[in-house]
Image (spheres, grey):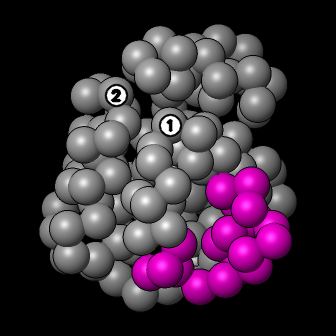
Amino acid sequence: MKEHEFLAKVKERGEYADQNEARAVTASVLGVLGERLAGNEPRDLAAQLPAGIGKMVTANGDAPESFGVEEFLRRIADAVGGSTETVTWDASAVLCTVAEAVTGGQLNQILSQLQPGYASLFGKPELA
């Protein structure tokens, strides 16, 4: 998947006005996800995403933190200036696109590090 295709899917899923809005939301969601993932997972995930998108995952460094879904959504809300209700939509638009863009093995690696509540954000509620 190319960067413009990834952003087009996020734009469509999130019903954003344009690709700039989709890019800003994507950067916020993937930046917080990168803060949450440990070990090589941020780099492994970034390697399977389009280059410009992958950089968003590793932008915040390599110091992983453990936090739940509520904190994940709060951090995104702070970044985009939204509420935790609206950013659930934002997170899902981005993370469902991530789930389509990466291999099943990579997605399993990501989900294995996260608490079950994250699975529905990736469009995988059966794993929750």
Residue at coordinates 64% horizontally, 29% vertically from top-left? 10
Residue at coordinates 75% horizontally, 32% vertically from top-left? 14
Residue matched to label 2: 50
Residue 27 found in image quarter: top left
For residue 77, side relative to residue 43 (left or right): right
Asked whether the residues under the numbered discs 1 and 2 touch, taking CB atoms below 8 Å apart as contact, a structural biologist would say yes
Name the chief secondary structure element in magenta: helix
Decide: is 7 above or below 111: above
Q: Mark 1 or mark 2, which has the lower sequence index?
A: 2
Callout 2 amino acid:
Pro
Residue 57 in picture, x, y percent from top left: 33, 50
Residue 35 found in image quarter: bottom left
Residue 73 found in image quarter: bottom right
Residue matched to label 1: 101
Identify the magenta region.
111-128
Label 2 CA crowd tier, 10 Å (few <14, some 14–19, many 20+): some
For residue 43, side relative to residue 57 (left or right): left
Residue at coordinates 34% horizontally, 28% vertically from top-left? 50
Question: Does the magenta run of residues contain 40?
Answer: no
